[in-house]
Image: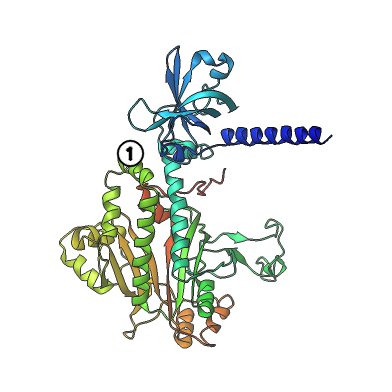
């Protein structure tokens, strides 16, 4: 009886071990790991999408990519060992599982390839209709198939870089002792005072209740007032900084600007640190250190993707990134910048004069031609800057700052914030802004106000700089633009 029981247990243990061994053999290994492996002769399993297939009647060479790297791995298939019905489905775009042996590559370009032993087709892709065949596709065409474009080399690289950058941003602020602060997406205030906001309402606007003067009665709406999608988390972020010391926001923001330029989308992401007890100099130090940290991180983690984009789209990309990393950011006032521009002898499309809002051509001249390094401009005329910026003693300028980069101009905008209640109130009144939506912001200047500063960075704009992409629609997975809310 005991012997039969021991035999039963032994059989179960053997079956369990075989199950574990089989699981280990069939467990997917990412291609990025296999390409760095030298464990030749070992069984491996990959799962991914077919990029290309070539070969002869005897052997097929299939390039497979699983999204973990810009590089494909080559799978060598001995055609005689496989059923023809399976082989005919291995076409560009098909999703497959390959089990086989990792061997040293016989070709050039990578160290390893796979000799196929078993093939399973998860999903077919009819070559007659699959739009991503082995040929060049324009970025304009790929925008029309945003649901498939992440499978291309270009967008795989861009979206991996987007991930690396997001991770670097969180890592940087966490290391610096900042707290990640969530500000509302639905708001009753306009942080920039610039309008162009998306309205949020549960009312049927075709049959909405109206007030005595014929206007929509938002008192009967869900929030009891007119509300919108936010254009910035800054104002609420300041409240966090005045309690937690240093915070950063990182979330979606929205502008209802009817623009179809390569620099505009309706939904985009912003990073906005706010720090108590910072002045404008501290703010500039933070911006420079932050930018160099995240760019350096992405260049290390995404070096293969950046090299690909450099070679295919922008031959000066890596040089431009190193330009930022290897140079100290020059700091000067707006007034000094205007004087340089007025005396440079260069003819600009937009005229230069004190009080003008600088255009990209002016900013790029200062960075690329005059100083030949990144620039931070400070102390702008108050009439061209937002109401919350701290006013200088001259009564004409504010302690604003813009960080200027090559190729794109402004990458960061920020300021020391006005902490004086009376000055802030007067500025709000001068601009005829709504006190009903800003009373809480003003009240922080009544109760334990403190010097503080912060800045805003457009996430997509920095991705454009890191990838060399010239259109913002190509650095966000599903761009929202006028007349386009698909996918």
| Residue 359 image-quadrant placement | bottom left
Tell me: 293 left or right of 64: left
Q: Residue at x 40, y 55 (%)?
A: 461
Seen from the viewer's position, the closer of residues 307 and 403 is: 307
Seen from the viewer's position, the closer of residues 181 and 90 is: 90
Tell me: 479 left or right of 287: right
Image coordinates for residue 260, horizontal then vertical, percent: 44, 49
Q: Quadrant of the C terminus?
A: top right
Secondary structure beneath label 1: helix
Q: In which quarter of the image is the N terminus?
A: top right
Image coordinates for residue 67, horizontal then vertical, percent: 48, 39
The residue labelled by disc 1 is: 312
| Residue 119 image-quadrant placement | top right
Seen from the viewer's position, the closer of residues 400 and 134 is: 134
Disc 1 crowd, CA 10 A, few/some/many (<14, 14-19, 20+): few
Q: Residue at x 42, y 20 (%)?
A: 54
Q: Which residue is drawn at 61% across and 32% down?
A: 22
Image coordinates for residue 410, horizontal then vertical, percent: 34, 61
Q: Can residue 242 be seen in this view?
A: yes
Q: Is residue 94 visible?
A: no
Tell me: 287 left or right of 66: left
| Residue 157 image-quadrant placement | top left
Image coordinates for residue 340, horizontal then vertical, percent: 19, 68
For the image, the number of numbered tags is: 1
């Amino acid at each position: 009886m005991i012997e039969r029981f021991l035999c039963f247990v032994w059989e179960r243990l053997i079956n369990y071990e075989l199950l574990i061994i089989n699981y280990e053999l069939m467990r997917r290994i990412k291609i990025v790991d296999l390409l760095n492996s030298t464990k030749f002769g070992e069984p491996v399993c990959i799962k991914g999408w077919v990029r290309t297939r070539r070969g002869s009647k005897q052997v097929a060479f299939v390039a497979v990519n699983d999204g973990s790297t810009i590089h494909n791995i080559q799978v060598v298939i001995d055609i005689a060992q496989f059923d023809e019905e399976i082989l005919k489905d291995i076409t560009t775009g098909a999703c497959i599982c390959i089990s086989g042996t990792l061997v040293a590559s016989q070709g050039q370009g990578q160290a390893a390839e796979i000799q196929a032993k078993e093939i399973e087709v998860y999903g077919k892709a009819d070559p007659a209709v699959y739009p991503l065949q082995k040929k060049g596709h324009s970025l304009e065409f790929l925008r029309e198939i945003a649901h498939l474009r992440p499978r291309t080399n270009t967008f795989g690289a861009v979206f991996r870089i987007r991930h690396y950058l997001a991770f670097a941003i969180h890592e940087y602020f966490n290391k610096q002792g900042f707290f990640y602060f969530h500000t509302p997406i639905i708001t009753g205030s306009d942080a920039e005072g610039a309008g162009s906001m998306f309205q949020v309402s549960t009312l049927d606007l075709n049959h909405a209740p109206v007030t005595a003067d014929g206007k929509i009665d938002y008192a009967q709406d869900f929030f009891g007032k007119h509300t919108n999608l936010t254009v910035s988390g800054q104002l609420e972020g300041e409240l966090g900084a005045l309690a937690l010391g240093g915070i950063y926001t990182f979330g979606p923001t929205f502008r209802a600007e009817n623009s179809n330029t390569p620099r505009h989308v309706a939904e985009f992401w912003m990073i906005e640190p706010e720090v108590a007890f910072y002045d404008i100099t501290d703010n500039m130090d933070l911006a420079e250190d932050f930018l160099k940290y995240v760019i350096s991180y992405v260049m290390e983690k995404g070096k293969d993707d950046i090299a690909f984009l450099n070679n295919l789209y922008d031959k000066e990309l890596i040089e431009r990134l190193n330009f930022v990393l290897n140079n100290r950011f020059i700091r000067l006032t707006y007034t000094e910048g205007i004087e340089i521009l007025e005396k440079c002898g260069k003819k600009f499309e937009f005229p230069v004069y004190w009080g003008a809002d600088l255009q990209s051509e002016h900013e790029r001249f200062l960075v690329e031609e005059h100083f030949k390094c990144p620039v931070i401009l400070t102390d702008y005329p108050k009439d061209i800057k937002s109401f919350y910026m701290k006013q200088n003693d001259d009564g004409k300028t504010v302690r604003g700052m813009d960080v200027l980069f090559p190729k794109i101009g402004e990458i960061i905008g920020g300021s020391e914030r006005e902490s004086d209640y009376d000055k802030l109130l007067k500025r709000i009144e001068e601009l005829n802004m709504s006190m009903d939506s800003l009373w809480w912001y003003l009240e922080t200047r009544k109760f334990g106000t403190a010097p503080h500063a912060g800045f805003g960075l457009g996430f997509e704009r920095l991705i454009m700089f890191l990838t060399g992409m010239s259109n913002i629609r190509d650095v966000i997975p599903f761009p929202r633009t006028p007349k386009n809310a698909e996918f």
